Image (cartoon, rainbow, N blue to C red):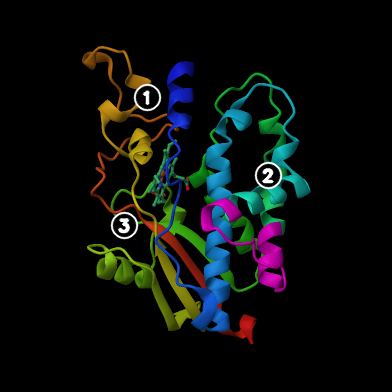
Amino acid sequence: MKKNTSQFYRIIPFLFCLVTFASQANLSFEKIILNEITKMYMSSMTFIFLNQPLINQKGGNKEALFGDKFIDNIKATYQQKHNEEFPLLDHKLKQLLVQSMVEVMEDNKMLFNDEDIGFKGIIPAIFAAQLSAKLATKGIGLKIKFTRTKEDIRNVLNIPDQWESKVMAKIIEKPEIYYDEQAIINDKPAYRQFTPLPMAPYCLKCHGSMEHNPLNAGKDKEEWTNIDMTGFEMENWTLNDFGGGVSISIEKSVLE
Ligand code: HEC
């Protein structure tokens, strides 16, 4: 299992790469913020993905996962992914997002430093869900969600709302960023954006079928399991399936 896990993390092509974002030159202030926050959120997922060996390591120095060091690492990840500087933290939403990232890692500190547990289960999707939940507690009119079409949803908190379902139905054949400046959330006018996440071969290790499951490597077919390394039933997705995406909403009053 150890060997397979390390093989898994060696596959690092276009990690959590998003569809291309438009250049900022002609964008409105609102759209720039939505884009920046989406990219910040996704960069933190990428960093969590890249650092699974460190996260799951028993013991050792894990300072890179906490506090300012953690944020510096996310900034570097952002820069590498998007070939541009990490956004200035010149708006309270961006500041609170960064603060929430640090808090989520702090919440998991005992787990990360546990010397007996190997696989800690803090994969990008779990980190993203915890980050979304943390933001929700701040009551700041910013909501971020990692979601997908209703069937096959693993975490009920990720179930799409009506807007998200409608948008996904529209773009599922040809995934592209969908922006809506006339949306409503919690009965309040809001800016909303859905950014699809393309499928990549490594997604299949958990969401694919049994032959992709690293837990089955080197085993006879009769012994194969359709439970992935995170304990969920695999969904048999293929590379041609829809990978879901990041949905972000900001209440208009927050940006006024
Ligand atoms: C290591 C296993 C693993 C890998 C690899 C993985 N996922 Fe997931 N994924 C999960 C788990 C576990 C959850 C549920 C997280 C939670 O509790 O919110 C999840 C949740 C999701 C969700 C949110 C909706 C839901 O079902 O709760 C989407 C969308 C998703 N994954 C897409 C992807 C895509 C696309 C990739 C590749 C880019 C990928 N995943 C790679 C394990 C994985």
Task: Give the x, y percent position of residue 222.
Answer: 22, 14
Q: Nearer the viewer, residue 198 or 214?
A: 198
Residue at which label 3 appears: 150
For the record, the magenta segment spans: 79-98
Measured Cα–Cα span from mark 3 to mark 2: 29 Å
Residue 23 against residue 187 in the figure, above or below: above
Res 244 → quadrant: bottom left
Measured Cα–Cα span from mark 1 to mark 2: 27 Å
Which kind of residue does numbered mark 2 sit on? Met
Quarter holding ligand 1: top left
Q: Earlier in the sequence, mark 1 or mark 2?
A: 2
Q: Earlier in the sequence, mark 3 or mark 2?
A: 2
Task: Give the x, y percent position of residue 188.
Answer: 52, 83
Q: Residue at x 52, y 63 (%)?
A: 38
Residue 84 painted magenta: yes
| Residue 98 in the figure: left or right of residue 4 | right
Disc 3 is placed on an element classified as loop
Residue 39 against residue 212 in the figure, above or below: below
Residue at which label 2 appears: 105
Q: Are marks 3 and 1 in contact (CB under 8 Å)?
A: no
